[in-house]
Image (cartoon, rainbow, N blue to C red):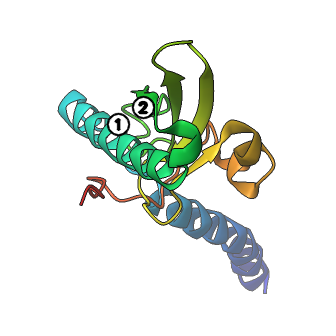
Amino acid sequence: MNLVKKYYVLSLAAIPAAVLFVGLSACSDNQPGPVSWETQETQRAIAIENSEFNARAFRLKNKEKYAEFNIMGRGDSTISSKCANGDGWASVDLVHAENDVKVSLKCSTASAAIGCLTKADFSSRSYASQEGRCNNELPIPMPRIVK
């Protein structure tokens, strides 16, 4: 009888450990391992290309206001060896060529459908919670949205 109790107690201790192991394994599936410098640079280049495409579309859609503005893209600063996707957002400025008026945008690095938002509009939406956080839902390599 003593032996049965011992196995019973051991099995009770093993269940939480197994649940914890499975839970941690599931989390790690969403986290890609460290990526090479080459992969980071590829992701950065695509993020800039995509965000500038979105900025051009934003400028065209709002051409009565921004036709004379140049695009100054800065990319996604959260792309790193541990986060090849970045947060999915890039800072882009529209700068007037003559009077240095600047309009700050946040542009998606992966979606033409989302495109760009003014920084004030971005801050008021749920997208703002993604800023600075690794977005593991984005694919590696990031698809080019330039058409």
Residue 53, compared with residue 21, is above or below; it is above
Residue 90, compared with residue 99, is above or below; it is below
Relative to the observer, which residue lies in front, 127 or 13?
127
Position of residue 17 measured from the top left corner of the image (x, y, whole percent):
65, 64
Which three-letter amino acid code belongs to the residue tagged 1? Answer: Ile
Relative to the observer, which residue lies in front, 30 or 67?
67
User: Looking at the image, is mark 2 or mark 1 earlier in the sequence?
Assistant: 1
- Is residue 134 visible from the viewing direction of this image? no
Taking the spot 30% from the left edge, 58% from the top edge, the residue there is 145
- Report helix, strand or loop for mark 1: helix
Taking the spot 79% from the left edge, 80% from the top edge, the residue there is 5
Residues under labels 2 and 1: Cα distance? 5 Å
Question: Which residue of the protein is positioned furthest toward the front in this rendering?
Answer: 64
Taking the spot 76% from the left edge, 54% from the top edge, the residue there is 125
Mark 2 and mark 1 in contact? Answer it, CB < 8 Å: yes
Position of residue 68 measured from the top left corner of the image (x, y, whole percent):
46, 30
Residue, disc 2: 75
For the N terminus, the quadrant is bottom right
Residue 48: mark: 1
For the C terminus, the quadrant is bottom left
Alpha-carbon neighbours of circle 1 within 10 Å: few (<14), some, or many (≥20)? many
- Is residue 43 visible from the viewing direction of this image? yes
Whether residue 40 sits left or right of residue 118 in the image: it is left
Residue 98, compared with residue 128, is above or below; it is above
- Report helix, strand or loop for mark 2: loop
Relative to the observer, which residue lies in front, 38 or 88?
88
Taking the spot 74% from the left edge, 47% from the top edge, the residue there is 121
Position of residue 88 measured from the top left corner of the image (x, y, whole percent):
50, 48
Which three-letter amino acid code belongs to the residue tagged 2? Answer: Gly
